[in-house]
Image (tube, rainbow, N blue to C red):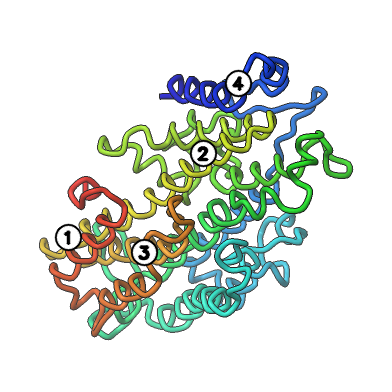
Amino acid sequence: MRNLLYVAAVTATFFTSCSSDDDINEIEENEIIIPANYTFERDGQSTVDYNGQTTRLQMAAELNAAFTDFDNSSEQLLLDMFSNTNNAFSNEELNASDKSIKSKIASSNLYFSTNTVESNEIKADFEGFISEQMTTVLQNKEEVAEAGVAGQIASGSSVRYVNEKGLELNQAFAKGLIGGLLADQILNNYLSTAVLDEGDNRSNNDDTITEDGQVYTTMEHKWDEAYGYLVGDPSIPGNDPFSMLNQSNDRLLFSYLGQVDADEDFAGIAAETLEAFKVGRAAIVAGDYELRDEQVAIIRENLSTVIAVRAVHYLMGGKTSLAEGEFGSAFHELSEGYGFIYSLRFTNNPDNDMPYLETESINAIKSALLAGNGFWDVTPETLDSSAQEIASEFGFTVAEAAE
């Protein structure tokens, strides 16, 4: 697949650049050199930098871990981690950073630059997950959960903590973060035309005018920041992330890219996505913006599909566990599914630059899952219809995603 993509990229460049014999010099000047790994240099120095994304991924990892550490966590501590205030992290480098998770939630140029009302509502949702976990669920952590009552529930050899509707708030938060932070920043912010081509970015990139004190152009850096939200966990070698697929410590989007890739119905999606990041970056270096935008479309479709596949996968897994009377396992899977359904809001259909499902449809699915006593009451019919609605919008079958 990688070789095929390489050939496609070079062929695309040839035909867009070569319209006559007079263009030969231009072809040589704009030749696209695609490295074996995601390694780009200028004057012997690496031009790849996504430290800010690594910082936020580290913040998210520590916050997610604190969600169920009831002995050492509190509502205020988790809210402080979310906004990076009051030295809440155990890692002092994170406390010293001027970055935060909250500031980047639902903040993409494409979807939220003129939609601050919804952006604030989404931020409030995430804070609500934190507050409910550290009040209602924490207060009932020693109680056995039942319909209408928060508490603990057995899930195999594990104990899960759920609210009165059976929802694990830590799972809703973590899987919602995959969309609200990572996908939104990758698909709808850094890879958007408005950000990549902002101001003089194209002309500066064409003339190799780098940012002050840096060796990269602004466009190169924006592309790398998108890449960093996918592979920025310190356990992932950014120059060759494929080597750590399903082996890294990442528990966010990169992890689920690997899990979907492991399903034979979606095999190759990881290689194609990572190759598209590499080819797109090489296209920027060569000033081939048509080829760059073709890679954006691939990335948007593939990462959006990952979110949808896992949403359907967990709905069907929850349905199976409910039928077997394994309520703890069922609620865990349905909670993960709920988080991925939340993340559907941030997918991007490259055909129209819009989410694959309308917000009203996503909200309707979430409401159906949590109606009445929530997961305690949810029916197989509701799970089937929700899964079918999602799958049909993305062009795969429920059976393919359920494996």
Kindly report the distance in space between the C-alpha atoms of the residues bearing marks 2 and 3: 22 Å
User: Pointers 2 and 3 in contact (CB under 8 A)?
Assistant: no
Nearer to us of marks 2 and 3 is 2
Which label's residue is closer to the chain start, 2 or 3? 2
Tell me the number on the disc at residue 357: 3
Would you name the residue on which mark 2 appears? Answer: 294
Which label's residue is closer to the chain start, 1 or 4? 4
In the image, what residue type sits under mark 1? Ser
Q: Position of residue 240 (x, y in %)?
A: 55, 29
Kindly report the distance in space between the C-alpha atoms of the residues bearing marks 1 and 4: 58 Å
In the image, what residue type sits under mark 2? Glu
Decide: few, some or many residues near mark 3? Use Cα within 10 Å; few <14, some 14-19, many ≥20. Answer: some
Q: Position of residue 22 (x, y in %)?
A: 69, 16
Kindly report the distance in space between the C-alpha atoms of the residues bearing marks 1 and 3: 27 Å
User: Pointers 2 and 4 in contact (CB under 8 A)?
Assistant: no
User: Pointers 4 and 3 in contact (CB under 8 A)?
Assistant: no
